[in-house]
Image (cartoon, rainbow, N blue to C red):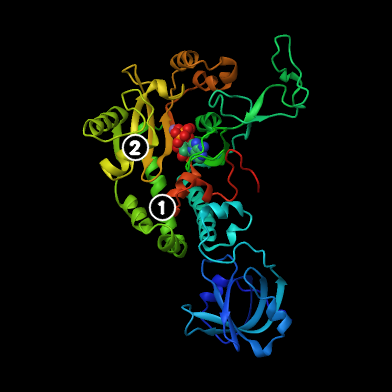
Amino acid sequence: MEKISRTRVVDLLNAETFGTAVNAKGWVRTRRGSKQVSFIALNDGSTIHNIQIVVDLGKFDEELLKLITTGACLSVNGILVESVGSGQKAEVQATEIEVLGACDNSYPLQKKGHSMEFLREVAHLRPRTNTFGAIFRIRHHMAIAIHRFFHERGFFYFHTPIITGSDCEGAGQMFQVTTMNLYDLPKDDNGQIDYSNDFFGKQASLTVSGQLEGELAALALGAIYTFGPTFRAENSNTPRHLAEFWMIEPEVAFNEIEENMQLAEDFIKYCLQWALDNCAADLQFLNDMVDKELIERLKFVLNNSFVRLTYTEGVSILEKAVTGGHKFEFPIYWGADLAAEHERYLVERHFKAPVILTDYPKEIKSFYMKQNDDGKTVRAMDVLFPKIGEIIGGSQREENYEKLKCRAAEMGVPEKDIWWYMDTRRFGTAPHSGFGLGFERLLLFVTGMSNIRDVIPFPRTPNNAEF
Ligand code: ATP
Ligand code: MN
């Protein structure tokens, strides 16, 4: 076969000059045609669209033609011509075809319209479908948008550890990290596991959040963000929880809660605008196939301000809804942790817009959140989104050493685990704020998908780590 350097399908489809010899490589999505001619839809992942390859059957060897089946990988030399009928601007009239990889007939993606559940069982192949190709291209673009947003605003990308020795944030939902022999664990006199000979000389786990270390950095570099994998062994089989997910956590010195809210709103809107500007074809596909209101919803959120109210105000709206006859599964009263159904009621039924709830009861929030003067609430903020519920959780942090120490003790956080964190409050403390955005929750919103397992390439959930 003549050596012609490869042109990506996206570039072939955007070509302005025709009549030239080109090479395309990719996987066969469909093949149809007559006894004389075949039309092959070839896709190489560079775009949702396929390039049509026109094959004059008389010019090719029958044995070769037999191998051109759905899923096979081809290298095609041919002439790029302006297309008349294929719905695309360009197509390739094949002159030479090489089958790089034949595809045997057990290929599971033979037809269109597989269920999402089925596709999770073939997660090693699902990137080859239109839907998952679109999702993973959008996932890439969102990661770029996130880095650009913070970089443009002078934030520094800061790497917090994935293995951590402190469990003050997520006691009970952490994955342990050990090199000890689990069949023969050393015990101390009290029958407790002796970690002194473990790899780190102490109990260690996978991180549930980079926030505490992020705060150290913000109080030195001014404004930072983390963007990394996060692990939570919460045994909740919901469409919004993964055991391994990616989190973005900005932390900013001198920001108070109002600035923190504005940052969150600007940040999400920047990402949504980026998706509309850079992922138009993929979004259009998802809008047509997955969620007919997707693009409209993205534009709506972009063009409207997030509603801001306190937890206390939110709870009274929910209580009125109950009085008015609305049924929730979980009880609602001042002090209750809001369930997704409560969050979604506020967003979807009451305000019909994204909501930022602030000033939650201190009992249901973490020890490090800044305490309000009322003695009951803390300067927490959750951003609640349509279809999703909580997409961001954040707060202004308690910068006062004594108050923080007191609250940590009340909540049973051992000082030996957070002495280094407490030090920031002794050595030049400052007001500061930050939040965590679940990357996959953002992707749920941007793609219109309804299960979080379908916006990450290889989902980790209870009983599921196959691929
Ligand atoms: P939720 O109440 O929804 O379980 P959370 O309050 O435990 O979330 P935070 O600790 O505030 O979550 O984490 C910050 C953000 O990380 C959340 O707003 C959410 O977007 C995301 N997040 C948290 N847990 C998960 C998870 N298990 N899978 C995917 N994303 C998550
Ligand atoms: Mn939260």
Which dot marks residue 208? none
- Residue at image location 42% in from the left, 26% down from the top: 431
Question: x, y (%) of residue 404?
Answer: 46, 18
Whether residue 41 is visible to the viewer of this picture, yes or no, is no
How far from the left and from the top, in percent, is residue 245?
A: 55, 41
Ligand 1 lies under 8 Å from the Cβ of mark 1: no
Q: Is residue 32 left or right of residue 287?
A: right
Q: Amino acid at mark 2?
A: Ile
**Label located before the other in sequence (2 or 1):** 1
Residue that badge 2 annotates: 356
Q: Quadrant of residue 397?
A: top left
Residue at image location 21% in from the left, 34% down from the top: 324
Q: Residues within 10 Å of mark 1 (few under 14, many from 20)?
A: many
Query: Which x, y percent locates residue 221?
Result: 52, 35
Q: Residues within 10 Å of mark 2 (few under 14, many from 20)?
A: many
List x then y, in percent, for residue 148: 49, 50
Residue lying furthest top in this view? 189
Quarter assignment of residue 228: top right
In this rendering, position of residue 249 left or right of residue 31: left
Determine whether 424 is above or below 344 in the image: above
Q: Nearer the viewer, residue 146 or 70?
A: 70
Q: Is residue 329 visible?
A: yes
Dot 1 amino acid type: Leu
> Residue at 44% of width from left, 25% of height from top?
430
| 365 lies left or right of 466 | left
Element type where label 1 sits in the image: helix
Label 2 to label 1: alpha-carbon separation: 17 Å
Give the residue number, with chain letter if any, for mark 1. Answer: 272
